[in-house]
Image (cartoon, rainbow, N blue to C red):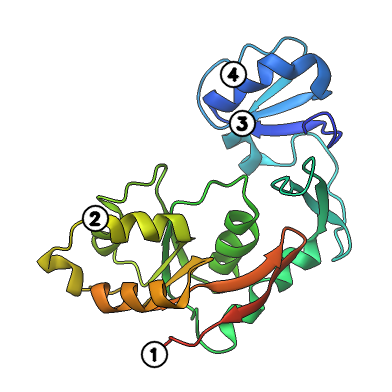
Amino acid sequence: QLADADLSVIVVDALGARALRAVLDDAGVSAVVMLDDIDPQLPGVTVHPFTDLAMGPLGREPVEVVASDIQAILYTSGTTGAPKGCMLPHGYFMNAPKQYFGDERIVAGDRIFCSYPFFHTSAQVFVLMLALAGPCELRLTTTFSATTFMKQARAEGATRLVGVAAMAAAILARPESPDDADPGTIRSAFWVPFSESDQLEFERRFNIATWGEGFGQTDRKSTRLNSSHIT
C-alpha cells in the first residue's frame, strides 16, 4: 500500500519506522516525520522531528487547498478483494461530521472516548473530524481492554463512547458489577454494527443511550444511521 499510494513523505513513530525499513526500497519515500525522539535508521531518507512542523512547512512552499483536493488515501478492508486506495478530498473530511450534529448525537464540548486505530476510516473521518468540527475533546486509548474500558471512560469524564460492536460485545461479556449502572458523565455510546437487542442490553446495564446500526463505506461514511434508542 505504501508503494501503491505513491508517497513522498510519511509520518511514523518508532514502530512505524521499523515497519518502513522492511519495505523502504519499494515505498519511494524521500522524507520521514518522526513522532518519537529516536534515529529511525532509514538510509537515504531525510528525517524531520515532528516538533519541526510547528516551525514551518519543512522547506516547502505553502499551497492553496480547495475542497476537491485529495487529503488522504485510505485503504478499504479488502472484504470483497484486494484493498483499494480511496482518494478522499478535504471536502469529504470537512462534511462527514455534519450528520452527527443535526439531532444532537454529538454537541460542542463533548468529550469522546475511543480505542480506534488511526489507520481506520472511522478514526480519521468520524472521530477525529468530530472533535475538530465540534469542537469536542478526544480521549484515546492505545489499547482496548474490555475489563477497564468503562472505568477508564468514566475516569476521563467522557460524554460519548465510540467503537466497533466487537468491543461492546466484549464489555457485555464481562460479569456485571454494581458500578455498571452509574454512567458518570457518559450520555451515549455508538457501537457499529450493533443489533437492536444488544443496544437495549447495553442501555439497560450501563444506563447509557446506545445507537449502533449504520451503513457506509470508506469513501461513503455512514449513509444511514439508526437513532431509535437515543434519549
For the residue marked with disc 2, what is the amino acid?
Arg
Q: Earlier in the sequence, mark 2 or mark 1?
A: 2
Residue sitting at 77 percent across and 66 percent down? 92
Give the amino acid type for the residue marked by disc 4 in the picture.
Arg
Estimate the spatial distance between the alpha carbons at disc 1 and disc 3, rounded to whole Å: 41 Å
Q: Can residue 215 be seen in the rendering of this structure? A: yes
Q: Position of residue 45 (x, y in %)?
A: 75, 17
Q: Which residue is mark 1?
A: 231
| Residue 45 visible in the picture | no
Q: Amino acid at mark 3?
A: Val
Query: Between tags 4 and 3, which lies in front?
Result: 4
Residue 174: numbered disc:
2
Is residue 62 positioned above or below 59 on the image? below
At x 40%, y 76%, the residue is 197
The amino acid pointed to by label 1 is Thr
Counting residues from the start of the chain, the first of labels 1 and 3 encountered is 3
Circle 3 crowding by C-alpha within 10 Å: few under 14, some 14–19, many from 20: some
What whole-number distance in Å separates the C-alpha atoms at marks 1 and 4?
46 Å
